[in-house]
Image (tube, helix red, strand yellow):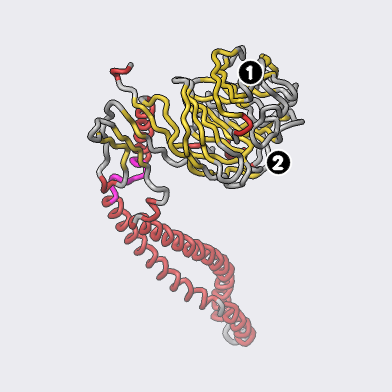
Amino acid sequence: MWSLSAVLNPLLFLLLFGSCPSVTIRPKEGWQVYSSAQDADGRCICTVVAPEQNLCSRDAKGRQLRQLLEKVQNMSQSIEVLNLRTQRDFQYIMRMESQIKGLRSKFRQIESDRKTLINKNFQELKGKMESLQPLIPVLEQYKTDAKLISQFKEEIRNLSGVLMGIQEEMGAYDYEELQQRVVNLENRLRNCMSKLTCGKLMKITGPLTVKTSGTRFGAWMTDPQASPKNNRVWYMDSYTNNKIVKEFKSIADFVAGVESRTYNLPFKWAGTNHVVYNGSLYYNKMQSNIIVRYSFETGRVVTQRALESAGFHNVYPYTWGGFSDIDLMADELGLWAVYATNQNAGNIVISQLNPDTLQILKTWNTEYSKRNAGESFMICGTLYITNSHLTGAKVYYAYSTKTSTYEYTDIPFHNQYFHMSMLDYNARDRALYGWNNGHQVLFNVTLFHIIKTEDDS
Protein backbone atom coordinates (compact mmCIF):
# COMPACT_ATOMS: atom_id res chain seq x y z
CA MET A 1 0.00 0.00 0.00
CA TRP A 2 1.07 3.35 -0.78
CA SER A 3 0.87 5.45 2.42
CA LEU A 4 1.08 9.19 2.37
CA SER A 5 4.15 9.27 4.63
CA ALA A 6 6.05 7.82 1.71
CA VAL A 7 5.00 10.75 -0.44
CA LEU A 8 5.77 13.68 1.82
CA ASN A 9 9.22 14.92 2.82
CA PRO A 10 10.21 14.90 6.49
CA LEU A 11 9.08 17.98 8.39
CA LEU A 12 11.28 20.30 10.36
CA PHE A 13 9.72 21.10 13.69
CA LEU A 14 10.77 24.28 15.50
CA LEU A 15 9.86 23.97 19.15
CA LEU A 16 9.57 26.77 21.69
CA PHE A 17 9.30 26.86 25.51
CA GLY A 18 10.35 23.76 27.35
CA SER A 19 12.89 21.04 26.85
CA CYS A 20 13.00 17.86 24.84
CA PRO A 21 15.29 14.85 25.20
CA SER A 22 18.52 14.63 23.30
CA VAL A 23 18.86 11.29 21.58
CA THR A 24 21.44 10.80 18.87
CA ILE A 25 23.02 7.92 16.99
CA ARG A 26 26.71 7.76 16.33
CA PRO A 27 27.54 9.54 13.04
CA LYS A 28 29.39 6.55 11.64
CA GLU A 29 26.15 4.56 11.79
CA GLY A 30 24.57 6.83 9.19
CA TRP A 31 21.38 7.54 11.14
CA GLN A 32 20.18 10.30 13.40
CA VAL A 33 16.92 9.61 15.17
CA TYR A 34 16.38 13.13 16.46
CA SER A 35 18.37 15.68 18.35
CA SER A 36 17.78 18.84 20.31
CA ALA A 37 19.57 21.93 21.46
CA GLN A 38 18.72 25.12 23.30
CA ASP A 39 19.69 28.57 22.13
CA ALA A 40 20.61 31.53 24.33
CA ASP A 41 16.94 32.37 24.92
CA GLY A 42 16.12 28.88 26.15
CA ARG A 43 14.30 27.88 22.99
CA CYS A 44 14.45 24.21 22.11
CA ILE A 45 15.11 23.26 18.49
CA CYS A 46 14.32 19.67 17.55
CA THR A 47 14.91 18.03 14.21
CA VAL A 48 13.99 14.68 12.74
CA VAL A 49 16.38 13.37 10.10
CA ALA A 50 15.73 10.24 8.05
CA PRO A 51 18.42 8.52 5.99
CA GLU A 52 18.49 9.31 2.29
CA GLN A 53 16.58 6.85 0.18
CA ASN A 54 19.68 5.94 -1.81
CA LEU A 55 21.97 5.73 1.22
CA CYS A 56 22.42 1.97 0.99
CA SER A 57 22.84 2.01 -2.78
CA ARG A 58 25.83 4.31 -2.47
CA ASP A 59 27.46 2.24 0.28
CA ALA A 60 30.64 0.40 -0.78
CA LYS A 61 29.59 -2.77 1.00
CA GLY A 62 26.21 -2.58 -0.71
CA ARG A 63 27.94 -2.40 -4.09
CA GLN A 64 30.14 -5.35 -3.22
CA LEU A 65 27.13 -7.40 -2.17
CA ARG A 66 25.35 -6.58 -5.43
CA GLN A 67 28.42 -7.66 -7.41
CA LEU A 68 28.58 -10.92 -5.49
CA LEU A 69 24.87 -11.46 -6.08
CA GLU A 70 25.37 -10.98 -9.82
CA LYS A 71 28.24 -13.46 -9.71
CA VAL A 72 26.09 -16.04 -7.95
CA GLN A 73 23.33 -15.52 -10.50
CA ASN A 74 25.78 -16.02 -13.37
CA MET A 75 27.10 -19.18 -11.75
CA SER A 76 23.56 -20.46 -11.24
CA GLN A 77 22.80 -19.93 -14.91
CA SER A 78 25.98 -21.72 -15.96
CA ILE A 79 25.23 -24.68 -13.69
CA GLU A 80 21.72 -24.85 -15.14
CA VAL A 81 23.19 -25.02 -18.66
CA LEU A 82 25.54 -27.80 -17.56
CA ASN A 83 22.65 -29.66 -16.00
CA LEU A 84 20.56 -29.52 -19.19
CA ARG A 85 23.53 -30.58 -21.31
CA THR A 86 24.36 -33.43 -18.93
CA GLN A 87 20.79 -34.73 -19.09
CA ARG A 88 20.88 -34.64 -22.90
CA ASP A 89 24.22 -36.46 -23.05
CA PHE A 90 23.09 -39.02 -20.50
CA GLN A 91 20.10 -39.96 -22.66
CA TYR A 92 22.43 -40.30 -25.64
CA ILE A 93 24.78 -42.59 -23.70
CA MET A 94 21.86 -44.72 -22.59
CA ARG A 95 21.00 -45.29 -26.24
CA MET A 96 24.65 -46.16 -26.95
CA GLU A 97 24.65 -48.70 -24.11
CA SER A 98 22.34 -51.05 -26.00
CA GLN A 99 24.56 -50.83 -29.05
CA ILE A 100 27.65 -51.62 -26.94
CA LYS A 101 25.88 -54.71 -25.58
CA GLY A 102 25.10 -55.76 -29.17
CA LEU A 103 28.75 -55.24 -30.08
CA ARG A 104 29.82 -57.51 -27.24
CA SER A 105 27.55 -60.32 -28.46
CA LYS A 106 28.97 -59.97 -31.96
CA PHE A 107 32.49 -60.45 -30.61
CA ARG A 108 31.40 -63.66 -28.92
CA GLN A 109 29.77 -64.93 -32.11
CA ILE A 110 32.90 -64.20 -34.17
CA GLU A 111 35.04 -66.06 -31.68
CA SER A 112 32.82 -69.16 -31.88
CA ASP A 113 32.74 -69.24 -35.68
CA ARG A 114 35.72 -67.43 -37.08
CA LYS A 115 35.79 -68.91 -40.53
CA THR A 116 32.27 -69.14 -41.95
CA LEU A 117 30.81 -65.88 -40.66
CA ILE A 118 33.88 -63.70 -40.26
CA ASN A 119 33.24 -61.52 -43.33
CA LYS A 120 29.57 -60.94 -42.59
CA ASN A 121 30.19 -60.26 -38.90
CA PHE A 122 33.09 -57.98 -39.74
CA GLN A 123 30.77 -55.76 -41.80
CA GLU A 124 28.22 -55.66 -38.99
CA LEU A 125 30.96 -54.90 -36.48
CA LYS A 126 32.20 -52.07 -38.66
CA GLY A 127 28.69 -50.57 -38.75
CA LYS A 128 28.40 -50.80 -34.97
CA MET A 129 31.76 -49.06 -34.49
CA GLU A 130 30.72 -46.25 -36.82
CA SER A 131 27.46 -45.76 -34.86
CA LEU A 132 29.52 -45.40 -31.67
CA GLN A 133 31.82 -42.79 -33.20
CA PRO A 134 29.66 -39.78 -31.99
CA LEU A 135 30.12 -40.96 -28.43
CA ILE A 136 33.74 -39.78 -28.43
CA PRO A 137 33.04 -35.97 -28.43
CA VAL A 138 30.31 -36.50 -25.84
CA LEU A 139 32.81 -38.10 -23.49
CA GLU A 140 35.26 -35.29 -24.22
CA GLN A 141 32.57 -32.76 -23.31
CA TYR A 142 32.00 -34.63 -20.05
CA LYS A 143 35.67 -34.10 -19.20
CA THR A 144 35.34 -30.35 -19.88
CA ASP A 145 32.13 -30.08 -17.87
CA ALA A 146 33.73 -31.92 -14.99
CA LYS A 147 36.51 -29.33 -14.91
CA LEU A 148 33.94 -26.47 -14.98
CA ILE A 149 32.03 -27.99 -12.11
CA SER A 150 35.24 -28.25 -10.10
CA GLN A 151 35.96 -24.58 -10.81
CA PHE A 152 32.43 -23.60 -9.74
CA LYS A 153 32.82 -25.51 -6.49
CA GLU A 154 36.04 -23.65 -5.77
CA GLU A 155 34.44 -20.27 -6.58
CA ILE A 156 31.49 -21.04 -4.34
CA ARG A 157 33.87 -21.84 -1.47
CA ASN A 158 35.69 -18.54 -2.04
CA LEU A 159 32.40 -16.66 -2.30
CA SER A 160 31.18 -18.10 0.98
CA GLY A 161 34.33 -16.86 2.67
CA VAL A 162 33.90 -13.35 1.24
CA LEU A 163 30.25 -13.19 2.31
CA MET A 164 31.13 -14.27 5.84
CA GLY A 165 33.79 -11.56 5.97
CA ILE A 166 31.34 -8.89 4.82
CA GLN A 167 28.76 -10.08 7.32
CA GLU A 168 31.28 -9.74 10.13
CA GLU A 169 32.27 -6.25 8.93
CA MET A 170 28.71 -5.02 8.50
CA GLY A 171 27.58 -6.42 11.84
CA ALA A 172 25.14 -3.76 13.03
CA TYR A 173 23.88 -3.16 9.51
CA ASP A 174 22.00 -6.40 9.04
CA TYR A 175 18.48 -5.90 7.73
CA GLU A 176 16.66 -7.07 10.84
CA GLU A 177 18.52 -4.58 12.99
CA LEU A 178 17.97 -1.79 10.46
CA GLN A 179 14.26 -2.57 10.48
CA GLN A 180 14.19 -2.43 14.27
CA ARG A 181 15.94 0.93 14.19
CA VAL A 182 13.29 2.23 11.79
CA VAL A 183 10.61 1.13 14.27
CA ASN A 184 12.46 2.89 17.08
CA LEU A 185 12.72 6.03 14.94
CA GLU A 186 8.96 6.00 14.30
CA ASN A 187 8.22 5.50 18.00
CA ARG A 188 10.47 8.41 18.99
CA LEU A 189 8.95 10.58 16.30
CA ARG A 190 5.43 9.81 17.56
CA ASN A 191 6.56 10.56 21.11
CA CYS A 192 7.96 13.90 19.98
CA MET A 193 4.83 14.68 17.95
CA SER A 194 2.57 13.91 20.91
CA LYS A 195 4.18 16.81 22.78
CA LEU A 196 3.38 19.30 20.04
CA THR A 197 0.41 21.64 20.26
CA CYS A 198 -0.93 23.54 17.27
CA GLY A 199 1.53 25.35 15.02
CA LYS A 200 1.78 28.41 12.85
CA LEU A 201 2.28 28.09 9.10
CA MET A 202 5.80 29.07 8.08
CA LYS A 203 6.37 27.56 4.64
CA ILE A 204 4.66 25.64 1.81
CA THR A 205 6.73 23.38 -0.47
CA GLY A 206 5.84 21.28 -3.49
CA PRO A 207 3.63 20.41 -5.10
CA LEU A 208 3.88 16.69 -5.67
CA THR A 209 1.63 15.69 -8.56
CA VAL A 210 -0.22 12.56 -7.49
CA LYS A 211 -2.44 12.17 -10.55
CA THR A 212 -3.78 13.97 -13.60
CA SER A 213 -7.49 13.38 -14.15
CA GLY A 214 -10.91 14.97 -14.47
CA THR A 215 -11.86 18.47 -15.50
CA ARG A 216 -10.13 21.73 -14.56
CA PHE A 217 -12.17 21.92 -11.35
CA GLY A 218 -12.81 19.36 -8.63
CA ALA A 219 -11.93 18.04 -5.19
CA TRP A 220 -10.16 15.04 -3.72
CA MET A 221 -9.58 14.27 -0.06
CA THR A 222 -8.91 11.80 2.73
CA ASP A 223 -10.45 11.68 6.20
CA PRO A 224 -8.24 13.41 8.83
CA GLN A 225 -10.12 11.54 11.57
CA ALA A 226 -9.50 8.09 10.08
CA SER A 227 -7.12 5.57 11.64
CA PRO A 228 -3.57 5.34 10.25
CA LYS A 229 -4.50 2.12 8.42
CA ASN A 230 -7.49 3.75 6.73
CA ASN A 231 -6.21 5.66 3.69
CA ARG A 232 -9.38 5.87 1.61
CA VAL A 233 -9.53 8.63 -1.00
CA TRP A 234 -12.69 10.36 -2.23
CA TYR A 235 -12.89 12.04 -5.61
CA MET A 236 -15.49 14.62 -6.75
CA ASP A 237 -15.01 15.93 -10.29
CA SER A 238 -16.39 19.32 -11.43
CA TYR A 239 -17.92 22.15 -9.41
CA THR A 240 -21.59 21.77 -10.45
CA ASN A 241 -24.19 19.46 -11.95
CA ASN A 242 -22.69 16.34 -10.42
CA LYS A 243 -23.51 14.07 -7.50
CA ILE A 244 -21.20 11.06 -8.09
CA VAL A 245 -18.49 10.47 -5.49
CA LYS A 246 -15.80 7.89 -6.26
CA GLU A 247 -14.01 6.06 -3.46
CA PHE A 248 -10.58 4.42 -3.57
CA LYS A 249 -9.10 2.21 -0.85
CA SER A 250 -5.72 3.93 -0.92
CA ILE A 251 -3.70 6.56 -2.74
CA ALA A 252 -2.05 3.75 -4.70
CA ASP A 253 -5.48 2.60 -5.92
CA PHE A 254 -6.40 6.20 -6.67
CA VAL A 255 -3.31 6.62 -8.85
CA ALA A 256 -4.04 3.29 -10.58
CA GLY A 257 -7.71 4.22 -11.06
CA VAL A 258 -9.01 1.21 -9.10
CA GLU A 259 -12.32 2.31 -7.61
CA SER A 260 -13.65 0.46 -4.57
CA ARG A 261 -17.09 2.07 -4.47
CA THR A 262 -19.26 4.79 -6.03
CA TYR A 263 -21.80 6.93 -4.15
CA ASN A 264 -24.75 8.62 -5.81
CA LEU A 265 -25.60 11.59 -3.60
CA PRO A 266 -29.25 12.63 -3.21
CA PHE A 267 -28.41 16.26 -4.06
CA LYS A 268 -25.96 17.81 -6.50
CA TRP A 269 -23.14 19.84 -5.00
CA ALA A 270 -22.00 23.41 -5.57
CA GLY A 271 -18.32 24.37 -5.73
CA THR A 272 -15.29 22.26 -4.89
CA ASN A 273 -15.02 23.06 -1.19
CA HIS A 274 -16.20 19.80 0.32
CA VAL A 275 -14.65 17.91 3.23
CA VAL A 276 -14.69 14.38 4.61
CA TYR A 277 -14.63 14.34 8.40
CA ASN A 278 -15.04 11.33 10.69
CA GLY A 279 -16.67 9.14 8.05
CA SER A 280 -19.10 11.76 6.67
CA LEU A 281 -19.02 14.00 3.62
CA TYR A 282 -19.95 17.64 4.18
CA TYR A 283 -20.91 19.65 1.10
CA ASN A 284 -22.91 22.64 -0.12
CA LYS A 285 -26.18 21.72 -1.77
CA MET A 286 -26.45 23.21 -5.26
CA GLN A 287 -28.23 26.60 -5.60
CA SER A 288 -28.65 26.99 -1.84
CA ASN A 289 -26.80 27.85 1.35
CA ILE A 290 -27.71 24.44 2.81
CA ILE A 291 -24.91 22.26 4.18
CA VAL A 292 -25.45 18.51 3.79
CA ARG A 293 -23.88 15.83 5.94
CA TYR A 294 -23.81 12.48 4.11
CA SER A 295 -22.72 9.26 5.87
CA PHE A 296 -20.55 6.94 3.79
CA GLU A 297 -21.35 4.08 6.15
CA THR A 298 -25.13 4.24 5.74
CA GLY A 299 -25.22 5.86 2.31
CA ARG A 300 -27.76 8.41 3.51
CA VAL A 301 -28.04 12.06 4.46
CA VAL A 302 -27.70 12.35 8.23
CA THR A 303 -28.28 16.09 8.61
CA GLN A 304 -28.78 19.17 6.48
CA ARG A 305 -29.00 22.75 7.68
CA ALA A 306 -29.05 26.20 6.12
CA LEU A 307 -26.12 28.49 6.84
CA GLU A 308 -28.12 31.58 7.66
CA SER A 309 -27.33 34.74 5.65
CA ALA A 310 -24.52 33.01 3.72
CA GLY A 311 -24.24 34.05 0.09
CA PHE A 312 -24.49 31.28 -2.51
CA HIS A 313 -24.58 30.60 -6.27
CA ASN A 314 -21.70 32.94 -7.13
CA VAL A 315 -22.84 35.82 -4.93
CA TYR A 316 -19.63 35.71 -2.85
CA PRO A 317 -17.32 33.16 -4.53
CA TYR A 318 -13.54 33.00 -4.54
CA THR A 319 -11.75 34.85 -7.35
CA TRP A 320 -12.18 31.94 -9.77
CA GLY A 321 -15.98 31.71 -9.36
CA GLY A 322 -17.30 28.16 -9.67
CA PHE A 323 -20.06 28.53 -7.02
CA SER A 324 -17.30 28.55 -4.39
CA ASP A 325 -19.35 30.72 -1.99
CA ILE A 326 -19.32 28.26 0.93
CA ASP A 327 -16.06 26.53 1.84
CA LEU A 328 -16.22 23.62 4.31
CA MET A 329 -12.97 22.55 5.95
CA ALA A 330 -11.52 20.71 8.95
CA ASP A 331 -8.39 21.06 11.08
CA GLU A 332 -7.04 19.95 14.46
CA LEU A 333 -9.86 21.81 16.26
CA GLY A 334 -12.86 20.55 14.30
CA LEU A 335 -15.23 21.43 11.45
CA TRP A 336 -15.48 24.92 9.92
CA ALA A 337 -17.46 26.88 7.35
CA VAL A 338 -15.98 29.90 5.53
CA TYR A 339 -18.37 32.13 3.63
CA ALA A 340 -19.53 35.77 3.28
CA THR A 341 -22.69 37.67 4.17
CA ASN A 342 -24.34 40.93 3.25
CA GLN A 343 -24.24 41.89 6.92
CA ASN A 344 -20.44 41.66 6.83
CA ALA A 345 -20.26 43.60 3.54
CA GLY A 346 -19.18 40.56 1.55
CA ASN A 347 -16.15 39.99 3.78
CA ILE A 348 -15.19 36.53 4.96
CA VAL A 349 -17.05 35.01 7.91
CA ILE A 350 -15.69 32.02 9.84
CA SER A 351 -18.03 29.70 11.73
CA GLN A 352 -17.13 26.64 13.76
CA LEU A 353 -19.75 23.92 13.32
CA ASN A 354 -20.97 20.99 15.38
CA PRO A 355 -20.07 18.00 13.17
CA ASP A 356 -23.18 16.07 14.23
CA THR A 357 -25.91 18.73 14.06
CA LEU A 358 -24.23 21.38 11.83
CA GLN A 359 -25.24 24.04 14.34
CA ILE A 360 -22.94 27.05 14.52
CA LEU A 361 -20.87 27.01 17.70
CA LYS A 362 -19.15 30.37 17.24
CA THR A 363 -18.63 32.94 14.49
CA TRP A 364 -15.86 35.43 13.62
CA ASN A 365 -16.18 38.30 11.13
CA THR A 366 -13.06 39.25 9.21
CA GLU A 367 -12.31 42.29 7.06
CA TYR A 368 -11.02 40.38 4.04
CA SER A 369 -13.25 40.42 0.96
CA LYS A 370 -14.37 36.94 -0.09
CA ARG A 371 -14.25 37.91 -3.77
CA ASN A 372 -10.58 38.90 -3.41
CA ALA A 373 -9.56 35.55 -1.96
CA GLY A 374 -8.14 32.86 -4.24
CA GLU A 375 -8.60 29.98 -1.76
CA SER A 376 -8.40 29.47 2.01
CA PHE A 377 -7.68 26.71 4.53
CA MET A 378 -7.64 26.25 8.32
CA ILE A 379 -4.66 25.11 10.38
CA CYS A 380 -5.03 24.99 14.17
CA GLY A 381 -7.88 27.47 14.25
CA THR A 382 -6.19 30.02 11.98
CA LEU A 383 -7.65 30.76 8.55
CA TYR A 384 -5.00 31.27 5.86
CA ILE A 385 -6.15 33.09 2.72
CA THR A 386 -4.41 33.20 -0.66
CA ASN A 387 -4.54 36.37 -2.74
CA SER A 388 -5.17 34.62 -6.05
CA HIS A 389 -5.96 31.31 -7.73
CA LEU A 390 -3.46 31.98 -10.52
CA THR A 391 0.32 31.91 -10.98
CA GLY A 392 2.17 34.01 -8.39
CA ALA A 393 -0.37 33.33 -5.66
CA LYS A 394 0.74 33.38 -2.03
CA VAL A 395 -0.77 33.13 1.43
CA TYR A 396 -1.42 36.78 2.06
CA TYR A 397 -3.67 36.97 5.13
CA ALA A 398 -4.12 34.97 8.34
CA TYR A 399 -6.94 35.28 10.87
CA SER A 400 -6.61 33.62 14.30
CA THR A 401 -9.87 32.51 15.90
CA LYS A 402 -8.00 32.05 19.15
CA THR A 403 -7.10 35.74 19.49
CA SER A 404 -9.64 37.20 17.02
CA THR A 405 -6.79 39.06 15.34
CA TYR A 406 -5.33 39.06 11.84
CA GLU A 407 -1.97 39.65 10.21
CA TYR A 408 -0.70 40.01 6.67
CA THR A 409 1.67 37.27 5.61
CA ASP A 410 3.94 36.55 2.67
CA ILE A 411 4.11 32.77 2.18
CA PRO A 412 4.51 31.85 -1.51
CA PHE A 413 3.58 28.51 -2.99
CA HIS A 414 4.15 27.06 -6.43
CA ASN A 415 0.97 27.11 -8.53
CA GLN A 416 2.49 24.68 -10.98
CA TYR A 417 -0.48 24.25 -13.31
CA PHE A 418 -1.64 27.90 -13.19
CA HIS A 419 -5.19 27.50 -11.81
CA MET A 420 -6.05 26.41 -8.26
CA SER A 421 -9.69 25.48 -7.64
CA MET A 422 -9.30 23.59 -4.35
CA LEU A 423 -6.81 23.88 -1.48
CA ASP A 424 -7.52 22.14 1.84
CA TYR A 425 -5.42 21.17 4.85
CA ASN A 426 -5.44 17.63 6.24
CA ALA A 427 -4.45 17.57 9.91
CA ARG A 428 -3.57 13.86 9.94
CA ASP A 429 -1.27 14.06 6.93
CA ARG A 430 -0.11 17.61 7.74
CA ALA A 431 -0.38 18.42 4.05
CA LEU A 432 -2.41 20.57 1.69
CA TYR A 433 -4.55 18.77 -0.88
CA GLY A 434 -4.97 20.72 -4.09
CA TRP A 435 -6.83 20.50 -7.40
CA ASN A 436 -4.55 22.33 -9.80
CA ASN A 437 -6.08 22.64 -13.28
CA GLY A 438 -6.98 18.95 -13.59
CA HIS A 439 -4.01 17.75 -11.53
CA GLN A 440 -4.40 16.31 -8.04
CA VAL A 441 -1.44 17.60 -6.01
CA LEU A 442 -0.02 17.62 -2.48
CA PHE A 443 1.83 20.45 -0.78
CA ASN A 444 4.09 19.93 2.21
CA VAL A 445 3.82 22.44 5.07
CA THR A 446 6.30 23.59 7.68
CA LEU A 447 4.74 24.66 10.98
CA PHE A 448 6.17 26.54 13.92
CA HIS A 449 5.14 24.46 16.94
CA ILE A 450 4.92 25.06 20.65
CA ILE A 451 6.10 22.13 22.72
CA LYS A 452 3.81 21.05 25.53
CA THR A 453 5.74 20.32 28.71
CA GLU A 454 4.57 18.53 31.84
CA ASP A 455 4.30 21.90 33.61
CA ASP A 456 1.75 23.03 31.00
CA SER A 457 -0.44 19.97 31.46
* Residues packed near mark 1 inside 10 Å, few (<14), some (14 to 19) or many (20 plus): few
Quarter holding the N terminus is top right
Q: Is residue 362 left or right of residue 63?
A: right
Residue at 68% x, 38% y is: 217
* Residue on which disc 2 sits: 215
Which residue, as the protein is rendered here, is positioned at the far front?
A: 345
Magenta range is: 170-178
User: Is residue 25 placed above or below 294 in the rendered structure?
Assistant: below
Residue at 71% x, 22% y is: 285
Say what amino acid the circle numbered 1 marks. Gln
Viewer-closest of 372 and 375: 372
* Residue on which disc 1 sits: 343
Say what amino acid the circle numbered 2 marks. Thr
- Element carrying mark 2: loop
Corner quadrant of residue 385: top right
* Residues packed near mark 2 inside 10 Å, few (<14), some (14 to 19) or many (20 plus): few
User: Is residue 183 placed above or below 113 in the rendered structure?
Assistant: above
Q: x and y percent of residue 310 in the render?
A: 66, 20
Q: Is residue 250 magenta?
A: no
Viewer-closest of 259 and 132: 259
Q: x and y percent of residue 29 in the render?
A: 28, 46
Q: x and y percent of residue 88 in the render?
A: 56, 66
Q: CA distance from mark 2 to mark 1?
A: 35 Å
User: Is residue 110 placed above or below 418 in the rendered structure?
Assistant: below
Whichever of labels 2 and 1 marks the residue nearer the N terminus, that label is: 2
For marks 2 and 1, give the one nearer the viewer. Answer: 1
Which residue, as the protein is rendered here, is positioned at the far right?
A: 241
Q: x and y percent of residue 221 in the render?
A: 59, 32
Determine which of the numbered discs, if any, sits on residue 40 in the image.
none
User: Magenta-highlighted stretch: main secondary structure?
Assistant: helix
Q: Is residue 400 left or right of residue 102?
A: left
- Residue 220 in view: yes
